[in-house]
Image (tube, helix red, strand yellow):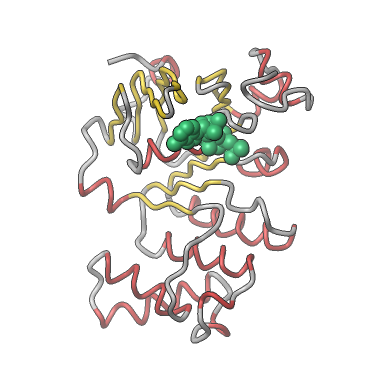
Amino acid sequence: MAIDPLTLDRGAATPLLATSALCYDAGGKRLIDNVTLSIRTNRRTMIMGANGAGKSLLLRLLHGLLEPTEGTVLWHGRTPGRAARLAQAMVFQNPVMLRRSVQANLRFALAAHGVRGKDRAEQTDQALVMARLTHMARSPARVLSGGEQQRLAVARALISKPDLLFLDEPTSSLDPASTQMIEDLVNAAHAQGVTIVMVTHDLGQARRMGDDVIFLHAGQVAERGALADVLAQPTASSTKAWLEGRLYTAKNP
Ligand SMILES: Nc1ncnc2c1ncn2[C@@H]1O[C@H](COP(=O)(O)OP(=O)(O)OP(=O)(O)O)[C@@H](O)[C@H]1O
């Protein structure tokens, strides 16, 4: 297995999630290229980089939604199985809601995780309060505004008490107030021990939320480390170019 230098440097125990020489090909192209990294427990890792750099693909590979062409993803040092699936959740840029009420969307997620009927109502009510959606509990989920839908999506992902939450640009189409509410929900989950891996284009958001950062460029890790350090002193030319607004696409810098 390829070795992740950051894990070694910090003398960490087995990381929560680790990849080794991960590659993903599609359309005759290598879109994720030899990515070796680790995600440490209870850190908030921001995945950043230009449009087309491979951020969403990497997130899907980490979560097991895509099969790697080469390389491995390990969960607690092992091949991910049912336990990994139950312990991970994901929030997409455009949430997909069941054609049911807000509370039914939450109950469905609980049922899928084997929570009994008696406990379901109580946990649903708690999630509604957390997402500030109690007043809309019986409304069809599809009539919610974009910000409300995303709050429901985050609450639905967190209701199963995951160890790791993936988020793919969860606030890219939201206004500042809705963005703040999503950040509050994610930070509250992190404060309770949930590890966060989030794709964002928003540098302000990354500064507000990130502990670590992974910069991707053309499917490869350009640089990574503690977010404050990388932003203060980027070493990769692609990271510098992106931070200065000079890198418009990963493929045609
Ligand atoms: N199934 C596929 N077949 C061919 N090319 C693909 C496929 N899926 C993704 N790509 C390409 O892989 C590259 C990386 O895609 P990805 O969605 O991961 O980028 P991203 O970094 O998340 O970009 P953005 O910031 O624009 O969302 C893009 O050039 C995309 O067009």
Instruction: Please tell me which residue lies in front, 179 or 59.
Output: 59
Q: Residue at x 44, y 42 (%)?
A: 42
Residue 212 visible in rendering: no
Horizontal side of residue 101 vs 81, given as left or right: right
Horizontal side of residue 180 vs 197, given as left or right: right
Q: Residue at x 78, y 23 (%)?
A: 246
As drawn, the residue found furthest toward the front would be: 27
Q: Would you place residue 108 above or below residue 48 in this image? A: below
> Looking at the figure, which quarter contains the C terminus?
top right
Instruction: Please tell me which residue lies in front, 76 or 140.
Output: 140
Q: Quadrant of residue 244?
A: top right
> Looking at the figure, which quarter contains the N terminus?
top left
Q: Residue at x 25, y 30 (%)?
A: 77
x and y percentages locating residue 221 in the rendered image: 51, 20
Residue 41 visible in rendering: yes
x and y percentages locating residue 40 in the rendered image: 41, 33
Q: Residue at x 45, y 75 (%)?
A: 126
Q: Would you place residue 229 above or below residue 140 in this image? A: above
Instruction: Please tell me which residue lies in front, 59 or 116.
Output: 59
Count of picture labels: 0
Q: Would you place residue 55 above or below residue 113 in this image? A: above
x and y percentages locating residue 196 in the rendered image: 48, 44
Horizontal side of residue 18 vs 49, given as left or right: left
x and y percentages locating residue 96 in the rendered image: 47, 63
Horizontal side of residue 62 vs 94, given as left or right: left
Q: Quadrant of residue 50?
A: top right
